[in-house]
Image (cartoon, grey):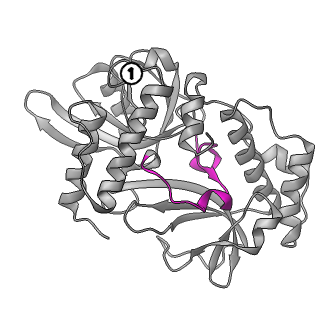
């Protein structure tokens, strides 16, 4: 199934109006109907699991969050009354994923954030009176905006880590955000996975050696841009998908060695355990992850992998239950 640009923009308006409480979820058929039905389920879970104030979550209930843009700002004049509007897609470890950021240029906090992101893609910290229309969109309101000194990379983010086990079912509407950076405007979801080059493309590496017998394969021919043939046999892959195509596309790759793959698996396991309120993976669990790599002919160093792993837990405590549900953990 494919949607025209006009149909996608209409769907975006419907999703925005539902999130802002302006309309109920419409009942329609087909893939769009399933997407909107899941959106209705999502709304019910937000009301159940997230401390909300009407149609949004107050920044004061969440605490300070970081935002790192993944694309340049898109700007246009909304009207003579409200002036310029800017938007982009960003990720936040505290919100446990992607978020669409909307900036009204006449507002002080939004204008400060706009000026930072027009200059470069520096991460920022916002705190105070922002509004999160969970889980898709955020506006800074009158929040404090501070530019962070350290750069932030999607390749190091915990919230995007996935393994082959997570690809056995299709992603639900909760994971999709409006995106213009990886193709024509559409809803997309992003994942970072460790992959192994095979004859037919890339096999996503699982969390357990027993799952190697039935690999999840990403066809190398659907890559944007085409995968560099010199990329090593092991890599981290940035994978994207829209709700209509039913397949994952390789958007980018980053070569890593076996210890880098093990670091990815440890980060994935620790993030899951963070959302479930559990302690970090113990030595036995790390050994089980090492067996996955030894089964495909790669030896690893636990100490080296732990040095590379991102074990910094940042998900806002009040959002952990919702983030766990959104990843299918309960």
The picture places residue 244, in percent across and down from the top left corner, at: 37, 64
The secondary structure type at the circle numbered 1 is: loop
Evaluate whether residue 121 shows in this view: no
Q: Nearer the viewer, residue 95 or 169?
A: 169
Q: Residue at x 27, y 31 (%)?
A: 20
* Residue 83 colored in magenta in the image: no
Q: Where is residue 92 in the image (x, y as percent from the top left)?
A: 52, 36
Q: In the image, is 5 to the left or to the right of 163?
A: left
129 left or right of 11?
Answer: right
Callout 1: 10 Å neighbours few (<14), some, many (20+)? many
Q: In which quarter of the image is residue 301?
A: bottom right
Q: Does the magenta stretch include residue 163?
A: yes
Q: Position of residue 189 (x, y in %)?
A: 46, 54
Report the number of discs.
1
Give me the residue at 39% from left, 21% from top.
130
- The residue carrying mark 1 is 130
Locate the N terminus and report the quarter of the image it occupies. bottom left
Q: Residue visible at 39% across and 18% down?
A: 143
Residue at 87% from the left image edge and 70% from the top image edge: 295
Determine the image quadrant of residue 57: top left
Q: What stretch is highlighted in magenta?
A: 152-173
Residue 197 lies, with reference to residue 321, above or below; the image says below
Q: Quadrant of the C terminus?
A: top right
Of residues 148 and 158, the one nearer the viewer is 158
Q: Quadrant of residue 109?
A: top left
């Amino acid at each position: 199934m494919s949607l025209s640009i006009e149909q996608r923009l209409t769907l975006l308006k419907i999703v925005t109006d539902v999130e802002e409480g302006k309309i109920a979820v419409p009942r329609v058929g087909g893939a769009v109907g399933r997407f909107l039905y899941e959106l209705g389920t999502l709304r019910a879970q937000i009301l159940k699991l997230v401390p909300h104030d009407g149609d949004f979550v107050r920044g004061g209930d969440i605490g300070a969050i970081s935002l790192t843009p993944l694309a340049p700002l898109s700007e246009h004049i909304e009207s003579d009354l409200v002036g310029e509007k800017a938007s982009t897609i960003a990720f936040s470890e505290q919100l446990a994923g992607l978020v669409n950021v909307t900036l009204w240029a006449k507002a002080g906090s939004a204008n400060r954030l706009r000026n930072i992101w027009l200059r470069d893609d520096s991460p920022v910290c916002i705190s105070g009176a922002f509004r999160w229309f969970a889980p898709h969109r955020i506006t800074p309101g009158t929040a404090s905006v501070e530019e962070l000194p350290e750069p932030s990379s999607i390749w190091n983010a915990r919230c995007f880590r996935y393994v082959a086990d997570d690809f056995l079912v299709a992603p639900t509407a909760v994971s999709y955000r409006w995106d213009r950076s990886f193709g024509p405007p559409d809803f997309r979801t992003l994942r970072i996975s460790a992959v192994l080059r095979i004859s037919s493309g890339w096999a996503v590496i699982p969390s357990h050696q027993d799952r190697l017998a039935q690999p999840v394969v990403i066809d190398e021919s659907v890559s944007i841009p085409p995968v560099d043939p010199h990329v090593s046999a092991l890599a981290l892959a940035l994978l994207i998908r829209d709700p209509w195509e039913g397949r994952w596309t390789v958007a980018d790759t980053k070569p890593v060695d076996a210890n880098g793959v093990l670091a990815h698996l440890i980060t994935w396991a620790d993030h899951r355990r963070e959302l479930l309120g559990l302690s970090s993976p113990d030595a036995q669990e790390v050994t089980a992850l090492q067996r996955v790599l030894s089964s495909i002919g790669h030896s690893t160093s636990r100490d080296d992998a732990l040095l590379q792993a991102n074990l910094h837990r940042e998900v806002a405590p009040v959002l952990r239950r919702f983030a766990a549900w959104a990843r299918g953990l309960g």
